[in-house]
Amino acid sequence: MAESGVNPTAAALLGLLHEGPMTGGQLMAAAERRLAPYWSMTRSQVYRELPVLAERGFVRMGKPGPRSSQPYALTAAGKRTFSRWLAEDPGRDTIRNPIALRIAFGSLHSPSQLKNLQAAANEYHTEALARVREQVKNAKKEGETYDASALEFAVAYHKAALSWLKSAPVG
């Protein structure tokens, strides 16, 4: 953790709560809508971080809603912490691509395994690219310039992956 004292998942939750109070489920939906193409968060991460953020005074819990849903609201301390996090050096990217890892061991695959791997990856990146392009279009339509820009990163990623897949040796 950097000087802000929060990890990236906690910071993402604080950032999303700038939109207003949300339950864990609503935060997951907002993260899926806004961040998922380039930043993954699991439900367990979200539900693990929320009580910690509340304990540290960065969010406050509201009145429980239906089915014991618990809304969380950003506090002034949470806003300050998020601002500090934004100002920190983001550090280096961590690249972990399961397809590239398998291709690295391509000599140990059968030709059919490699072809299936490439076909599945090609299908995934093609579908993801179409989805993210639609998200970019919607973000621009809504005037969400920064969201659109971050989503453009995901567009470039999927395009690069598709380009790489064309040149990857598959037997």
Image: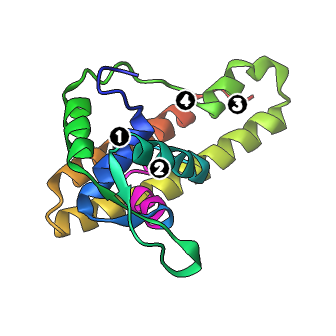
- For label 1, the residue is 11
Give amino acid for label 1: Ala
Asked whether residue 157 appears in the rendered view, the answer is no
Query: What is the spatial separation of the Cα atoms under label 4 and label 1, in whole angstroms?
Result: 37 Å
Identify the magenta region. 26-38
| Secondary structure of residue under mark 1 | helix
| Residue at left offset 72%, top offset 40% | 117
Query: What is the spatial separation of the Cα atoms under label 3 and label 1, in whole angstroms?
Result: 40 Å
Asked if residue 51 is positioned above or below residue 94 in the image, the reply reads below
Q: Which of marks 3 and 1 is in front?
A: 1
Q: Nearer the viewer, mark 2 or mark 3?
A: 2
Give amino acid for label 4: Ser
- For label 2, the residue is 50
Q: Nearer the viewer, residue 27 or 94?
A: 27
Sequence-wise first label, 4 or 1: 1
Verify CB contact (< 8 Å) between mark 3 and mark 1. no
| Residue at left offset 83%, top offset 38% | 112
| Residue at left offset 79%, top offset 18% | 107
Asked whether residue 143 appears in the rendered view, the answer is yes
| Residue at left offset 66%, top offset 24% | 101
Query: What is the spatial separation of the Cα atoms under label 2 and label 3, in whole angstroms?
Result: 44 Å
Q: Which of marks 4 and 1 is in front?
A: 1
Q: Nearer the viewer, mark 4 or mark 2?
A: 2
- The disc label shown at residue 170, or none: 3
Sequence-wise first label, 1 or 2: 1
- For label 4, the residue is 167
- Classify residue 66 as left or right of residue 140: right
Classed neighbour count for the residue bearing mark 3: other residues with Cα under 10 Å, few (<14), some (14–19), many (≥20) = some
Q: Nearer the viewer, residue 142 or 11?
A: 11
Q: Give the x, y percent position of residue 50.
A: 47, 50
Verify CB contact (< 8 Å) between mark 2 and mark 3. no
